[in-house]
Structure formats: C-alpha cells, structure tokens
Image (cartoon, rainbow, N blue to C red):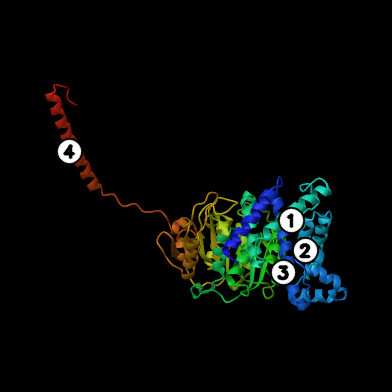
Amino acid sequence: MTDKDQIRLGKTLWAIADKLRGSMNADDFRDYMLSFLFLRYLSNNFEEAGRRELGTDWPLLDESDRRSPLVVWYGQNHNDIAMFEDVMRRKVHYVIKPEYLWSSIAEKARTQDAELLHTLQEGFSFIENESFSSSFQGLFSEINLDSEKLGKSYKQRNERLCVILQKIAEGLAEFPQDRDLLGDAYEYLIGQFAAGSGKKAGEFYTPQQISSVLSGIVSLDAQDPASGRREKLGMVLDFACGSGSLLLNVRRRMGKNGVGKLCGQEKNITTYNLARMNMLLHGLKDTEFEIFHGDTLLNEWPLLREENPAKKIEFDAVVANPPFSYRWEPNEELAEDFRFKGYGLAPKSAADFAFLLHGFHFLHREGTMAIILPHGVLFRGNAEAKIRKKLLQDGNIDTIIGLPANLFYSTGIPVCILVLKKCKKFDDVLFINASEHYEKGKRQNVLRQEDIDKIIDTYQNRKEEERYSRRVSMEEIEENDFNLNISRYVSTAVQEEPVDIEAVNQELNSLESRISEAKNRHNEFLEELELEKLP
C-alpha cells in the first residue's frame, strides 16, 4: 500500500459515486456507497481470518469458480459450522454467513441475479442482529433498499443495485485488498460527501487537518507537554463525534495499542451509524469502542450519569467539535445538573459553554481537553462571561488557539481551539494566533502540514513569537476583565514605521523651491517668445 494507492482509490470510488447517484442527492447516495464499502471490509476481514483458522482445510477453487471458498466449506462441513463460528466470534468478534459475503453479493450483481435486493436486505439484517456479540441494531437503518429513489418497482431497484455494486466491485478490484487502504478510502469519501453537503457537513465531519491539531495536543503529556507524547491514553471521549474521524485521528496519533477505548456520542442517527461503521472499518473490535446515540446536552448516556465522584467515569483525553452557537432550551432541572453546577447555564442562544462544561466534567485530573468553538466564547458577556471567569480563576484554561477563517465546509467563520486541564503546570495562558498561517483554497482554506506542526510545537514548548504566540499572565487577563479576545494579546498587525515630521517638512520645502525655480525658468522662455507668463 502506498499514499498514491490511497488517493487513487479514493478518487476512483468518488468518480463511481458521482456517476451512479443520478438524481439522488449526495447525502442519500452516501449512505448506500459507504454501507457497501463497509460490507466489503467486513467480508474480506472475515474471509482472511477464516483462511488462517482453517489452514489446510481451506478449499482451493479453480480460477473460473467465482464463489467464496467459505461457501464451499460451509456446504461440505455442516457439523463443524457452529464450532467454526464460535471460534471466529472469539477471534474477530463477528460472523458473516457465506451468502452475505461481499464476494457472494458482487457475483449476484455481476450476473444480474433477480434476488440480489432480497439477499442484501437479509444480509444487512443478519449483520445488525446476529453477526456481533455486541448489539449493532439499526446500523443500516438509514439505507432503504425499497426506496423509490432506486426505482419504482422491485425489478428496477434490483437492476440499479446490480449496476452500482458491479461498478464498485470493478473499481475495488484494481487495488490491493488492504484493510487500512479501504479505511482511508472510506474517510476520503466522507470528506468528499461533506464537501458537497455545504452547511450540513458540520453535522458529521471535522476536516482532517483540524483533527490533527487536536489529536496532536491531547496525545502529549498533560502536565509537561515538552516531555513528549504520553505512552498510553486509557479512554478518549468525543461527545459530538459525528462520523468518528476525530477519535480515529487520536488513535492514529497514539498508535493502535496506544488507546484503551474510544468513546463517542452522537445525536444524529445517520451520523451515529456512520461512526460505528467507521470504527469497525478501521480495524477496531467491538470491545475497543463504544458509540452512543443520544443528546449530549441532556446527558442521555447512562455511562455518564453517575453523580458520585468516586464512581464517575473519567477520560484521559476529551476532544470535540460541537455545533457552533447551538440554540437549546435549558430548564430548571439542568441548572442543578452536576456538570453545570457552580458555573451557571450557557444562554439559550448559544450552547457552546454547555458542551464545553459537559466534556470538562468528565476529564481526568491528569488529562487534556481540546475543543473547537466560535470566537464568541472568548469575549461574549453575561452568563458566558461568568463561566469564562470561573474557568480562568480556577486555572483550567491552558491555551487558546485562533485558527484561519473558512477551514470548515459548514461555515466560513474563524474558530478557535480551547485547551483545558483540571490540573495544569503553568499559571499563565498561552495565546496562539495562527489566523494568517494557511494555504488559500478554491472553496476552503487549508492548514498545511507546516502550519499544523507549528501550532503543536508552539503549544508543546510554550514558545513565544512576535505576532504569533504569547504567554499572558492572569494579572493582565484580569485587567482586561477576563476578555480572551486573541487580538488583544497577540496582534498580527504589522506596525508602521513612525513618520519623521521634520524630515517631511524639509522635503516639502525642497520640492516647493524646485517648483518655483522651474516656473521662473519656464516664464523666461515664454517672455522670449512674447507669450503670456504663468501666474
């Protein structure tokens, strides 16, 4: 596998999606396309594990035989199937019946089998309810194979699915069957569909470059970032996880064995399903992650509802990109909620601080939280000013990073990253103004790798640099009434050189003298020619 393979596969699949979706909008077709890629991944992974387990008993088929060897083995070993599946559940944590494997489905598509649609429906139902030890109910709930968007009759829908699946199978056949390759292609497609979704993309996608900044920060030692990356993160939380790309970026940064468990929460059912698929497709076992479908602001996840401090769940790292300035309806009961008590409630017009306080409550004492928020949280007044002041006085705000505008598909406004800790080493607050460090793109601006590295290095070593970063004392922040507007502390404006008034006057006098001399000479010429002089 090479980086070129990753890019080429992503582009190949996107071209197929763009061509085949027809009148179907990108969001609808996304669910079909990504689900089929997910099925292909599960199938290949299961068949590879089956080959290793069966060893010399693995059937060797003629090249002209397009069946999966597992189809043959199941047909010849009825008495051993239960034992084989029990072993596979322990080793790969799931089972797929041979008739539902990607190779079987792709062959039905190639031969225009009239039962393809029914087989797909049965296969999706089996994966949701019987494949895994954990429940993955509703995993394909957003994929309606009976939708008229595919065709008005069963026959039309079946034929359309045959074409789509055959084209995907042909596109995938050009590339090596590498698990990481397909996972990266899945991420690429999520990004491409996000680009076509405009503002809706903010519901499920954080651009990889921004994810890299957050993951780079939380993976460093919380007390002394300069000492380098932590050896291991126990549990990581993203309470507005979207498609899960931010959590996966933390795992990628730490290495596959560097994170104990990824935990995410997502309110949107479609995006929730995307996240679960994304985890499995990147090689995580169902015991290595947990994604909950529910409202974060109402704290609907039972795992996080423990009020006893001695029993509550805590996370070594918290990362999040919640919806910006989300309108919510806090009630009297929420005012007494253990997450907000002592701080007060965020205003109805903007739940930004409610999201922040939710994540901060579950942060471990030795952990780091990095959250993306609009700049308004840095300077807005009233209830938000009270929350901001308490966080500052308690020494919880460690670093504030201003990012360039137009980095997101969902909004063009500039945003900031707040880094919070419950127990931090430094008394000051580090301000990083990275708003002018980017590459301008046609639709969105882009953080280059050098820009990402500069932000992380500045945070890690707490560097100060003119017009870029500065450590600001709490005394100065208090003098500014706890206003954290970045430009107050780190301005990117270039100071103009002072004007020397006396030198300017001398130059003007010199110019006036030269003008007068030129005018007198000109009048002398006019006088010789007997013409009227200049006034």
Cα distance in 3D space between marks 4 and 1: 86 Å
The earlier-in-sequence mark between 1 and 2 is: 2
For the residue carrying disc 4, how many other residues have a C-alpha within 10 Å: few (<14), some (14-19), or many (20+)?
A: few
Q: Amino acid at mark 3?
A: Asn
Cα distance in 3D space between marks 3 and 4: 89 Å
Cα distance in 3D space between marks 1 and 3: 19 Å
The earlier-in-sequence mark between 4 and 2 is: 2
Cα distance in 3D space between marks 2 and 3: 18 Å
Q: Amino acid at mark 2?
A: Arg
The earlier-in-sequence mark between 1 and 3 is: 3
Residue at mark 3: 45
Vertical relation: 233 (above or below) 522: below
The earlier-in-sequence mark between 4 and 1 is: 1
Kindly check if marks 4 and 2 are in contact, taking CB atoms under 8 A apart as contact.
no
| Mark 4 or 2, closer to the camera | 2
The residue drawn where x is 66% and y is 63% is: 182
The residue drawn where x is 62% and y is 51% is: 349
Q: Amino acid at mark 4?
A: Ser
- Can you give x and y, in whole percent of width and height, for residue 389 in the image? 54, 62
Cα distance in 3D space between marks 1 and 2: 16 Å
Q: Which secondary structure lies at badge 2?
A: loop
Kindly check if marks 3 and 4 are in contact, taking CB atoms under 8 A apart as contact.
no
| Mark 2 or 3, closer to the camera | 2
| Mark 1 or 3, closer to the camera | 1
- Can you give x and y, in whole percent of width and height, for residue 413 in the image? 54, 51
Residue at mark 1: 165
Residue at mark 2: 66
